[in-house]
Amino acid sequence: MSTPPLDRRVANLEEKMAVLEELPARVTALEVQLSQFRGEVRAEFAATRSELRDEIRAGDEATRRELRGVIDDAVTGLRGEINAGDEETRRYMRVLHEEVIARIATIGERRSAPKKR
């Protein structure tokens, strides 16, 4: 293998140097692009976080409204059951009261009746 002539070797070195001389400008351009990309990514993440926060808040509020409705319905049902139970208890108390009055009257009749000898 023979070495290329000096003028060809110098030409090759000049071509390589020309490419290498472009590198700092290309690296600087890449730095600018990366900086812009970081800014865009930051902005997008911030927007995404904000949107997620809003969606979560809306979901929380919807859940609260639904739970309030369920709880209100349950409380209304329980109140109805309690009122019905109270009314039934009052009715039973009246019946017992009337029985006690009747028994007292019966006892009073026995006492006031003349005794047989």
Image (spheres, grey):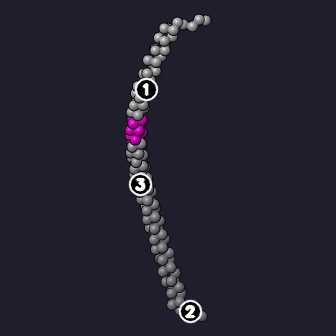
Quadrant of the rendered image containing residue 52: top left
Point out the stretch of residues depicted in magenta.
Answer: 38-48
Foreground: 27 or 67? 27
Foreground: 68 or 14? 14
Q: Which residue is drawn at 50% across and 79% down?
A: 100
Reply above or below: 28 against 48: above
How many numbered badges does the structure rendering display? 3
Considering only order in the chain, which callout, 3 or 2, is on the residue closer to the N terminus? Answer: 3
Query: How many C-alpha atoms fall within 10 Å of the one at disc 1: few (<14), some, or many (≥20)?
Result: few
Reply above or below: 12 against 68: above
The quadrant of the image that shows the N terminus is top right
Mark 3 element type: helix
Q: Residue at x 39, y 36 (%)?
A: 39
Percent x, y of residue 27: 44, 27
What residue would you read off at disc 2?
A: 115
What residue would you read off at disc 3?
A: 68
Q: Residue at x 47, y 77 (%)?
A: 98
What residue would you read off at disc 1?
A: 24
